[in-house]
Image (cartoon, grey):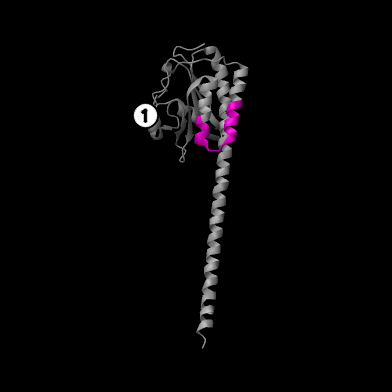
Amino acid sequence: MSDLNGYELKKFDAEQQLIALHKISVILSHSLNMEQTLQQVLSCLEELAGMQFGMVTLQNEDRQGMLVQALHGANPEVIRDVARIKYRTNEGILGAVQAKGETQVIVKVSQDPRFLDRLGLYDYNLPLICVPLGNSSNRAGVLVAQPVSGVLSELTAKTRFLEMVANLIMQTLTLSNTVQKRSKSYKIVMTNYFQIIKKQMALRLWWVIPLQCDKYLKP
């Protein structure tokens, strides 16, 4: 079975969901390089779950908005410009999901005025699912994907599935952040250690060199 665009549709039953979740779990467990890992997860969403144009936005350092961390299915021009796109808190559908920490499902994109269409990717006649990454106390970003068909009977299942994927992504993000913090702390400790050693060596040479010179200068 295929949609109007010729996309091969898979029946999104429990078995297919398990297959997709297993593949995504394996991808997330293989590497903490989040940029590469997220790209593979989004590709899997399209291949095994029938969800196109997957995107992950993550909160920026000032926590005033989100930047696109990964995007699948866009043309090179969009990929090149995506680094300049920012979604502010409470701005559009993504900003609302980030602010409230609640999943938002648009049954038909054209019917929701909050949709900003900054990427020019999504089909206005299809649904759009936006799921928060994290919880009310730790909101990291948003996972977005568009089902390749408008079959409403599958929309609930696909929304729950995407929420499970978001939970898996969040677990990996948390682990990655923890490793980075520990690595940074280790580097700081080692840097301070070597600075201390360097100072001690310099102090030792300051005493040793004059003594050696005195030995050779004695008549």
Residue 47 locus on image (x, y percent): 52, 22
Residue toward you, 51 or 134: 51
Residue toward you, 109 or 48: 48
Q: Is residue 2 above or below residue 129?
A: above
Residue under the point 54% across and 53% down: 188
Kindly identify the amino acid type of the residue bearing the numbered disc 1. Answer: Glu
Residue 160 locus on image (x, y percent): 58, 21
**Residue under label 1:** 77
Residue toward you, 166 or 201: 201
Q: Decide if residue 171 is in sight here.
A: no
Residue under the point 55% across and 67% down: 200
Q: Residues within 10 Å of mark 1 (few under 14, many from 20)?
A: few
Residue toward you, 209 or 108: 209
User: How many numbered discs, if any?
Assistant: 1
Q: Decide if residue 172 is in sight here.
A: yes
Dot 1 lies on which element? helix
Residue under the point 60% across and 15% down: 13
* Stretch in magenta: 22-39
